[in-house]
Image (spheres, rainbow, N blue to C red):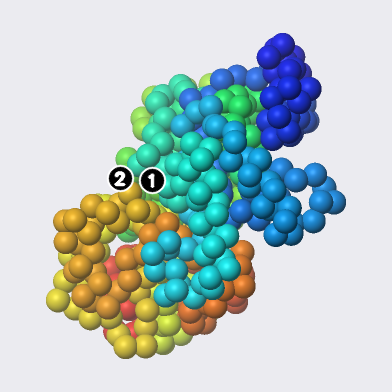
Amino acid sequence: MRITEEQQKILDGKEGKILQKAMSDLVKCGTAMGAEEFIPIASAHTTLSAMEAVAYAFLPRGVPITKDSIDKFSKEIANVRVKVKTTTNPGWMDLRKWRQMGAGEDVYNSVMRAVEVARRCGIMATHSCIPQLTDNIPLFGQHVSFCESSAFPYVNSFIGARTNREAYGVSLYSALLGITPNFGLHLDENRRGTHLVEVQCEMENFSDWGALGFWSGNKVGVGIAVFKNLRRPTVEEAEQLCAGVNSSGAGGVGMFHIPGVTPEAPTIEAAFGGNKPKETYIFDESAKRETYRYLNYKPEGKVDLVFIGCPHATLYQITQLAQMLEGKHVAKDTKLWIMTSSSFRAPAEQLGYAQIIEDSGAELLADGCLSLYYIGTNCKRPNMNRVATDSAKMAFIPRRSFNSNIFFGDTERCIDIAIKGGL
Ligand code: F3S
């Protein structure tokens, strides 16, 4: 890779060990991916779940992650400032209701230490998996460095900004340096459609979008799908599509096109940009039914946990959920958890929606993620033997990780299940 004099100085360690490590790993990444140079980025979205995870990205191989090594590392990194606007992915748990989620003090303290380091580095610890709708909204054509599998397809496909599917270490290095290697989806030629997906059924429910994403992610893998005959989604439906495409198959889908919606693709021809589709797939009623059948995994009569908010619920979703729950009560042996980020919980509290939700016995949680949290820690889980959710991504994760019985379906049906306590 060609690097500038200034970048070489950082690589030589003239600006400290942290930036040297960041630059060295970005050069390795860029070289491996065939990048010829770095480009400046406008913003970054990274992960700082807990201090152990941050230390893991920086400490040399073989250095054990102990309390002492983390303490030393925390002091070093806290002296460095990010070069661009940077936000963070969900941090395992609700920073206010962490005890309700089963977290111990040790995990809470580790997360808070990462929050403190983030503050000193100038990182906004927003703990949101929908930064592109809240605190980190890129503009068309901007280059950014985003992790989070539901966020980066949105950035590319609905906003027309450019990001690769970043690992959290790479996005953190890019945040600290303000640059990213120029390869993959930063380049025009890699943003063209590769496969045609013809939609031949109605998209009736919120959950249908997750089902379509899940199905097409499985078929197209890391290619770039061009959806034909797909109606314009709402922002929340678009989120479900993005989360779904990366829940199955290769799990690295960075982009797709919906002609007439994706900014770079006014037409199907423009979406392919001269490419011929490698394959055509048809998503019809039977494919949709089959996807629901697959994502509903031995659903049982009783349900222990109804989970809404993967990706995090927007304020509009919270408003709708409050309307569905007003005057009703969640069944005694069932939990209803609605996950959002603080950027949305604060106005939901101010406007009274949070109270309506909590009066029904449901929990409005913020800043966490059911899957990251219970997979990444030894925290006490709620009973998740039987789960209901409106998210294809969340339907797949507990089934794979905890062998839970899963009901996957529309939001209204999930709320009904929470009130009745079962199917
Ligand atoms: Fe967000 Fe976690 Fe779902 S990061 S997209 S709530 S799996």
Which residue type carries mark 1? Ala
Check disc 2 and report the residue beneath it: 234
Q: Residue furthest top?
A: 5
Asked if disc 2 and disc 1 are in contact, CB closer than 8 Å, the reply is yes
Looking at the rendered structure, the secondary structure element under dot 2 is loop
Between 173 and 206, the one nearer to me in the picture: 173
Q: Which residue is at 35% across, 42% downward?
A: 134
Q: Position of residue 83 (x, y in %)?
A: 53, 27
Q: Is mark 1 within 8 Å of ligand 1?
A: no
> Is residue 38 visible in this depiction of the protein?
yes
Instruction: Give the mark count.
Output: 2
Between 337 and 229, the one nearer to me in the picture: 337
Whether residue 217 sits left or right of residue 53 in the image: it is left
Mark identifier at residue 293: none
Q: Is mark 2 within 8 Å of ligand 1?
A: no
Q: Residue furthest right?
A: 62
Check disc 1 and report the residue beneath it: 238
Q: Position of residue 240 (x, y in %)?
A: 42, 52
Q: CA distance from mark 2 to mark 1?
A: 6 Å
Q: Which residue is at 51% across, 49% downward?
A: 116
When asked about the image quadrant of residue 341, the answer is bottom left
> Is residue 188 visible in this depiction of the protein?
no
The image quadrant where one finds the C terminus is bottom left
Instruction: Report crowding for label 1: few under 14, some 14 to 19, many 20 or more residues within 10 A (C-alpha).
Output: many
Q: Which residue is at 33% across, 44% downward?
A: 235
The image quadrant where one finds the N terminus is top right
